[in-house]
Amino acid sequence: MSAATLGGQFTFPDTSLTVHRIGYGAMQLAGPGVWGPPKDPDAAVAVLREAVAAGVSHIDTSDYYGPHVTNQIIRRALHPYPDNLVIVTKVGTRRGEGGSWIPAFSPEELTQAVHDNLRNLGLNALDVVNLRSMHGMTAPAEGSIEGPISVLAELRRKGLVRQIGVSNVTPAQIEEARRITPIVCVQNNYNLASRHDDDLIDDLAGQGVAYVPFFPLGGFSPLQSSTLSDVAARLESTPMQVALAWLLHRSPNILLIPGTSSVAHLRENLIAGQLTLSPQILAELDAIAATLLEGT
């Protein structure tokens, strides 16, 4: 796989951080439910090394995956890190007994989370830290994020965090955050079936801010569509490859972080960067957005 096929490149605004648009999301490297270690840690290491060897330069992670497990695997597999590798992590959540997800927005919790990420990744500073709101698992909840963003801004001033992003947030929360500190990326739920951020993506593209869709392949409800399957058959690809390629075509500021614990599946995901979707195919895919989850 040539790095040149990974969807092209994107530079985070007002930074020297440039990544290929197809990255890798590390969440699936932890055990079931993103809790505990994986069944085969060596296989997890192999996936990460394959990704970087293929040209992936953007890895998305968090120390609450496991917790601690995923970052420790990343460090084992890739440290010392290649100069061009950008590791983006998230804070704003902690894990409870049995793997529950608990919002963690206090200054003490956010500061501890940054230090946990630094320690387990083996870094002196984090490239990008996203403040992840867990008040809604897949859809943003209203409310001010001034307090936690201010904490991250202070950690940035101290040199522990280089850049800041936000995740699972509303447009109003993004603007609130940007009044406090530069925001280089937004990570929200978006895919062929979930198009609520269309206007936001276009607005961010005009400002040069990255948009990173989580659940790019549907997440808990994998994308299902006869039209998607038909397009994939015509392109001699898989539906998931077409869904990823559609995201790359959707806007130049979209960065992909599909996750997998399989080298074979990783290779399939990366092929999406080689697919060219004609205007006709794009129109077909756009037309099914409203009914995609119904399996039409």
Image (cartoon, helix red, strand yellow):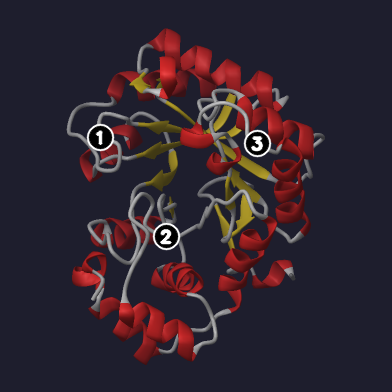
Residue 124 position within the rendered picture, expressed as x and y whole percent measured from the top left:
70, 22
Query: Which comes before the other along the chain, label 3 or label 1?
Result: 3
SS for dot 2: loop
| Residue closer to the observer: 283 or 70 | 70
- Nearest to viewer (mark 3 / mark 1): 3
Which residue type carries mark 3? Lys
Query: Which comes before the other along the chain, label 2 or label 1?
Result: 1
Instruction: Using residue 55 as the reference point, say whether residue 23 is left or right of it.
Output: left
3D distance between C-alphas at marks 2 and 1 = 19 Å
Question: Can residue 296 be seen from the camera position used here?
Answer: yes
Q: Quadrant of the N terminus?
A: bottom right
Figure quadrant of residue 174: top left
| Position above or below: 139 against 215 | above
Q: Residues within 10 Å of mark 2 (few under 14, many from 20)?
A: many
Which residue type carries mark 2? Leu
Query: Which comes before the other along the chain, label 2 or label 3?
Result: 3
Residue 291 position within the rendered picture, expressed as x and y whole percent measured from the top left:
20, 71
| Position above or below: 202 against 129 | below
Q: Residue at x 62, y 40 (%)?
A: 87
Number of the label disc, if any, that sits on residue 217: 2
- Nearest to viewer (mark 2 / mark 1): 2
Q: Residue at x 30, y 85 (%)?
A: 283
Q: Looking at the image, do the residues carrying marks 3 and 1 touch, with CB atoms under 8 Å apart? A: no
Residue 270 position within the rendered picture, expressed as x and y whole percent measured from the top left:
62, 66
Question: Can residue 95 be seen from the camera position used here?
Answer: no
Give the labeled residue for mark 3. 39
Q: Residues within 10 Å of mark 3 (few under 14, many from 20)?
A: few
Q: Looking at the image, do the residues carrying marks 2 and 3 touch, with CB atoms under 8 Å apart? A: no
Figure quadrant of residue 264: bottom right
Number of the label disc, if any, that sits on residue 136: 1
SS for dot 1: loop
